[in-house]
Image (cartoon, helix red, strand yellow):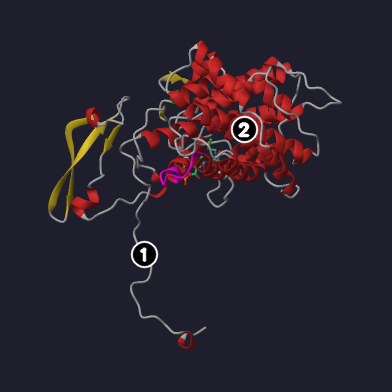
């Protein structure tokens, strides 16, 4: 990636130990500014300290742009609103990985590969029997994706030339793994992928079809699932994507890097939040619907409770994805004629929180997870699989970042530094002289 054109004549000045250092400044395509500190340590002997990387750019990227203050999100220059309205998930997956929307022929080719690679090696299918009952589906997913590296080692040594096939293989097989892990957990026979279904319809059929109760694909559900997966497609350098990049920076293979990303996404402060939202709403509902008590708990500085589904590290105005999801949620519940008291509860909480000074002052808005769980629940996805659904959507984004990193001539193995605050050098104490 050539970055010279992004450097501007302006320099940042740093005064330290009586000296003035000049640091280069760059400006990205959307006007965001950065001070390039890549030579800071060699010039000054200093490193920077930035817990949570709140101010640290780890790379330059051409995949996703987001402006948290304005509530803007776009993939490869296309607004999330347009993509969610006008595309299928497969088109957006292609866009993320390849950088351009597919032509009709390219889409046909990519969809053909998704079909071709949709089966799992039968030896891998036996793995599902060895996980103890009740195993978290994210743990199964992460393990199975790591195992893909040994079952499908071809192309690992030249991934970039084969990124089309590798990404199709991953995107297709992760869907099969997700559906199979559900069927196994339910003790039901597996339903294999079908070539005559679209990506989302195929997933729904693998999840919910049974020989005694055939699944009827509902286009409104397919549309909502497409939107959910598109909205989760990428979100620049979030925790799981940074994990994929960091692990991949050691030049480990794509499958192992993605498996690490899945583990990062599992965390309740990241991808696990959609599950936590439903659990929170269920708890409030079971306790008689007194949501005001929970709003007060969330505001209490001495109470660790947080209103899950509110707040975002980056979006401090609104989460553009939440608006689209809220509409899709209404459509699905209406189409399926579901009256969900949890949705009513969610709407009441949103209304109160949006006008409460605690939330307003801290700029805490509903995030994408606040409504996505209600859609998943309505279409029959079990709560413990919500984060798996997130992973399914995020997969093309992870692949795109991994590819971008491999292709980047500025690539370096990820290796942050630290400020050491432990004991200073001291003499070794032999066992007999150590006191209790
Ligand atoms: N409920 C109540 N108070 C909150 C919430 C919340 N959901 N989120 C933040 N706050 C408060 C904090 O207590 C803090 O208050 P203070 O200034 O009085 O100490 C202030 O708002 C700032 O909070 P931070 O934790 O510094 O904000 P940060 O940007 O680091 O955190 C995060 C973002 C982790 C998402 C946070 O808002 C949160 O925990 N939300 C709930 C979990 C959640 O919904 N996660 C999903 C995120 S979306 C995704 O990953 C796809």
358 horizontally vs 52: left or right: right
Q: Which numbered disc flags the more N-terminal residue, 1 or 2?
A: 2
Quarter of the image for residue 175 reads top right
In this view, the residue farthest toward the front is 154
Residue corresponding to mark 2: 173
Disc 1 residue crowd, few under 14, some 14–19, many 20+, Cα 10 Å: few
Q: Is residue 1 above or below residue 12?
A: above
- Quadrant hosting residue 421: bottom left
User: What segment carries the magenta color?
Assistant: 247-254
Name the disc covering residue 384, or none. none
SS under mark 1: loop
x, y (%) of residue 124?
Answer: 67, 41
* Residue 40 forms part of the magenta stretch: no
Find residue 337 and report its horizontal and vertical position in percent: 76, 19
* In the image: residue 351, left or right of residue 251: right
Number of residue marks: 2
Location of mark 1 (residue): 421
Question: Regarding mark 2 in the picture, which secondary structure is present there?
Answer: helix
| Spatial separation of the CA atoms under disc 1 and disc 2 | 45 Å
- Where is residue 99 shown, x and y percent of the image? 42, 23
Using the rendered image of the protein, determine whether residue 352 is visible from the camera's viewpoint.
Answer: no
Density class for disc 2 (Cα within 10 Å; few <14, some 14-19, many ≥20) is many
The residue furthest left is 19
The correct choice, above or below, for 258 with respect to 201 in the image is below
Quadrant in which the N terminus is drawn: top left
**277 and 233: which one is in front?**
233
Q: Is mark 2 within 8 Å of ligand 1?
A: no
């Amino acid at each position: 990636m050539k970055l010279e054109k992004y450097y501007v004549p302006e320099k940042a000045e740093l005064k330290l130990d009586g000296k003035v250092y000049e640091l280069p400044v760059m400006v990205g395509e959307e006007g965001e500014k950065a001070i390039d500190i890549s030579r800071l340590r060699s010039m000054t002997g200093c490193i920077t300290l930035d817990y949570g990387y709140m101010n640290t750019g780890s790379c330059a990227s051409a995949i996703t742009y987001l402006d948290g203050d304005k509530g803007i999100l776009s993939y490869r220059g296309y607004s999330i609103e347009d993509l969610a309205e006008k595309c299928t998930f497969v088109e957006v997956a292609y866009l993320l990985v390849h950088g351009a929307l597919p032509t009709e022929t390219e889409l046909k080719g990519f969809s053909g590969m998704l079909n071709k690679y949709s089966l799992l090696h039968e030896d891998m299918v036996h793995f599902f029997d060895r996980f103890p009952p009740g195993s978290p589906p994210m743990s199964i997913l992460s393990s199975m994706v790591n195992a893909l590296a040994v079952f499908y080692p071809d192309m690992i040594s030249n991934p970039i030339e084969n990124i089309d096939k590798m990404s199709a293989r991953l995107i297709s097989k992760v869907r099969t793994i997700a559906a199979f892990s559900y069927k196994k957990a339910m003790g039901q026979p597996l339903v294999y992928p079908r070539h005559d279904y679209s990506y989302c319809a195929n997933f729904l059929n693998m999840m919910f079809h049974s020989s005694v109760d055939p699944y009827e694909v509902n286009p409104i559900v397919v549309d909502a699932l497409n939107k959910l997966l598109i909205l989760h497609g990428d979100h620049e350098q979030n925790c799981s994507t940074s994990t994929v990049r960091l692990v991949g920076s050691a030049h480990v293979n794509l499958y192992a890097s993605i498996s690490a990303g899945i583990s990062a996404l599992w965390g309740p402060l990241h991808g696990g939040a959609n599950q936590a939202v439903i659990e929170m709403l269920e708890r409030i509902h079971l306790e008689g619907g007194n949501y005001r008590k929970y709003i007060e708990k969330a505001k209490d500085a001495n109470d660790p409770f947080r209103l899950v589904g509110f707040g975002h590290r980056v979006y401090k105005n609104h989460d553009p994805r939440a608006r689209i999801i809220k509409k899709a949620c209404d459509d699905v519940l209406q189409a399926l004629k579901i009256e969900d008291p949890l949705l009513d509860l969610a709407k009441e909480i949103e209304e109160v929180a949006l006008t409460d000074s605690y939330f307003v002052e801290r700029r805490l808005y509903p995030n994408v997870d606040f409504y996505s769980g209600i859609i998943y629940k309505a279409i029959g996805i079990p709560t413990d699989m919500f984060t798996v659904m997130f992973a399914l959507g995020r997969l093309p984004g992870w692949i795109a970042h991994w590819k971008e990193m491999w292709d980047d001539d500025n690539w370096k193995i990820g290796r942050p530094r630290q400020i050491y605050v432990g004991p200073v050098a001291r003499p070794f104490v032999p066992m007999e002289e150590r006191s209790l």
